[in-house]
Image: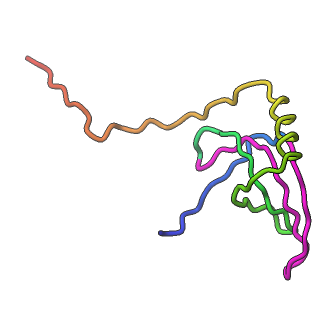
Amino acid sequence: MADKEIKCEVIKEFGTISKRSYNTRNGEVTEELKLRLISWNDRDPKYDVRPWEVTESGEKCLKMRGLTFEELKALGELINTIKEEPKKKTVPYRAKRNPTITKKVK
């Protein structure tokens, strides 16, 4: 499978559910489990619960993992703060694959 760049745009961050730090060969790493509204590849935004690896050079998204009971309670509190539905992105018009051709009758 070819490596394809994935575009990630954080529309809104609701909060951090949990945080843990650990040391690696490359230095200290902090992993934060966050609730965010994210647009992946310029599509409509979706609510995203995912751990993010935070280092000195920036953030990197990780694969989702199971939640502890405390994390689940924190997620519930963050969800209760959401007041409105996100706005949809404008999707550019794409022509149909097999458009119907109509002819004018003289």
From this view, report whether residue 82 is shown above or below residue 64: above
- Which residue is situated farthest in the top direction here? 106
Q: The C terminus lies in which quarter of the figure?
A: top left
User: Could you tell me residue 59's position as x and y percent?
Assistant: 79, 61
Q: Is residue 72 left or right of residue 99?
A: right
Residue at x 54%, y 64% (from the top left corner)? 4
Residue at x 63%, y 54% (from the top left corner)? 7
Q: Main secondary structure of the magenta part?
A: strand
Task: Between residue 6 and residue 25, name the one nearer to us.
Answer: 25
What is the total number of numbered labels drawn onto the structure image? Answer: 0
Whether residue 18 is in magenta: the answer is yes
Q: Is residue 102 left or right of residue 80?
A: left
User: Could you tell me residue 58's position as x and y percent?
Assistant: 81, 64
Whether residue 59 is in magenta: the answer is no
Task: Between residue 43 and residue 106, name the one nearer to us.
Answer: 43
From this view, report whether residue 42 is shown above or below residue 76: below
Residue at x 65%, y 44% (from the top left corner)? 39
User: Could you tell me residue 97's position as x and y percent?
Assistant: 30, 41
Magenta span covers which residues?
15-41
Q: Is residue 102 left or right of residue 46?
A: left
- Which residue is situated farthest in the left direction here? 106
User: Could you tell me residue 52's position as x and y percent?
Assistant: 79, 58
Q: Quadrant of residue 61?
A: bottom right
From this view, report whether residue 72 is shown above or below residue 81: below
Residue at x 60%, y 58% (from the top left corner)? 6
